[in-house]
Amino acid sequence: MSLKTKLLLFVALSAALALTPLAIMLVKANWALPIRDISVGLAFFGMAIAGMQFLPIARIPWLSDVVELDKMYKIHHVVSASSVLLVALHPLILLLTSSVYYSGFLIIGGWIGLAGLVLIAITSIYRKQLKISYTTWLLMHDLLTLLIMVFGLQHMFKRNYYMRDPAMAAAWILLIVIWGGLMLYMRLIRPLILGKHPYAVSKVVEEGKDTYSVYLKPEGFKRPAFKAGQVAWISKGPSPFVISRNPFSYSGSTEWDEVRFSIKKAGDFTNTIPNLKPGDRFFIDGPHGTFDLKNERMQKGLVLMGGGIGIAPVMSMVNTIADTGDKRPVYVFYGDLNEETAAFDQEFDALKARMNLTVVKVLEKPISPEACKYKGYITKDLLLSTLPENYKELFYFMCGPMPMMNAMNKHLAAMGVDHAQIATEKYEMA
Ligand SMILES: Cc1cc2nc3c(=O)[nH]c(=O)nc-3n(C[C@H](O)[C@H](O)[C@H](O)COP(=O)(O)OP(=O)(O)OC[C@H]3O[C@@H](n4cnc5c(N)ncnc54)[C@H](O)[C@@H]3O)c2cc1C
């Protein structure tokens, strides 16, 4: 099935499921109490889209290359915020128009569900300020989701204004089955599948200060194919049943038997990477992501811009291009702090002999003045003086800290590069 068909199916299915309760209500409500009907309609729509959030975050392999990961998470954030607003409007409208509806046992479930939704929103937006670790937040997110579903649905079914209609009850039961199925998939079925495909560490290589490459060997199975530029969620330890997995770009060639991830120390999980031993077990949930070197827009040549550990997906692309005998011109712009943090010098040198590769390294604060020809940041002038005349026909990929990506986007816009010729990978989606 083509990617376009999959995307259409995904959008049509999500819209149909999210809109069905509202559509049934519009057709069947007698509008005797229009204010109440409108407020309930908003809450129904809010609950339906809240539940559909399992779809974009379940990381279903069939959808893994359909929507860009950061777009998928952006959709998740926007739709979640909208669902909180829509559900909150329901009691607000009723409270403002009548006092009859604000208390009573049947309503408590609704208030608890709404409180859960608001808590999810607050802890998601202000997680870092509230100093909640990512794993704790994920656990809270799961528990609050369960609370919202249980109490929200209890309120809807117990209130029983609209659920008396068999079509409405059937629609909600169908939604509950789908949500439950997706939750079961995420928390039980997917780990069981991953458990059948363990990987073992074959080696860990220090690439630069605080950056390590981990090579993982599939244990007794042929590893799934991936595309350069794709991402996987990985977990360490004997069991695939974990609270959270961490996302990393593949940094090795698609042609190697082993997979490689290049990881910078950043916190609880990544700090343990230097202590890994050969044979340590990993589970890999992937590949995910839409980047594909075969895309026709990329055939004239590539400009790959990596900042810091954002160089990881670039390494996968250049290694794959070299291994497949691809002769496209490739320009790599690599920005890092200094000669100690910068990685992959020798690998780039070896790759230059095997492919049409130009590497421009820029160090923000080199320790020694001779360490690098270019100091500071990647500028528009540096891009223009390095790239060929037909630079507008090349395809641009960038991955790095947000300030770097914003600066690069500005340079490319000023150079007249079409937006459709640019792909970005953000490492901040949670
Ligand atoms: C699509 C994508 C690709 C990435 N590729 C690479 C890569 O190739 N190499 C690399 O070094 N880093 C990569 N990262 C960043 C990497 O995932 C985080 O640095 C790492 O997960 C931090 O985990 P920690 O436990 O060490 O740190 P923590 O201190 O626990 O977390 C630091 C921050 O990392 C983020 N984070 C932590 N866990 C997760 C998670 N499970 N999912 C999403 N974000 C999380 C949170 O914003 C958190 O605040 C990528 C991130 C994304 C979103």
Image: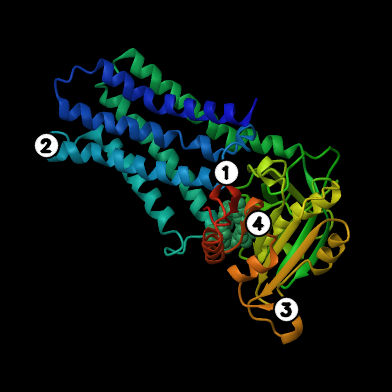
- Would you say the residues marked 4 and 1 are in contact, meaning their CB atoms lie under 8 Å apart? no
Label 2 – label 1 distance at C-alpha:
43 Å
Residue visible at 69% across and 46% down in the picture = 298
Label 2 – label 3 distance at C-alpha:
70 Å
Write down the residue under mark 4: 391
Which corner quadrant of the figure contains ligand 1? bottom right
Q: Nearer the viewer, mark 3 or mark 4?
A: 4
Write down the residue under mark 2: 97
- 383 up-or-down from 72: above or below: below
Residue furthest top as drawn: 166
Q: Position of residue 292 (x, y in %)?
A: 69, 43
Q: Secondary structure at mark 1?
A: loop
Q: Amino acid at mark 1?
A: Glu
Query: For the N terminus, which image quadrant?
Result: top right
Label 3 – label 4 distance at C-alpha:
22 Å
Q: Earlier in the sequence, mark 3 or mark 4?
A: 3
Is residue 284 visible in the rendered structure shown here? Answer: yes
Write down the residue under mark 1: 68
Q: Which mark is residue 373?
A: 3
Q: Which mark is residue 352?
A: none
**10 Å neighbourhood of mark 3: few (<14), some, or many (≥20)?**
few
Q: Amino acid at mark 4?
A: Tyr
Q: Is residue 92 left or right of residue 399?
A: left
Q: Position of residue 102 (x, y in %)?
A: 17, 38
Q: Secondary structure at mark 2?
A: helix
Q: Amino acid at mark 3?
A: Lys
Q: Is residue 197 left or right of residue 305?
A: right
- Would you say the residues marked 2 and 1 are in contact, meaning their CB atoms lie under 8 Å apart? no
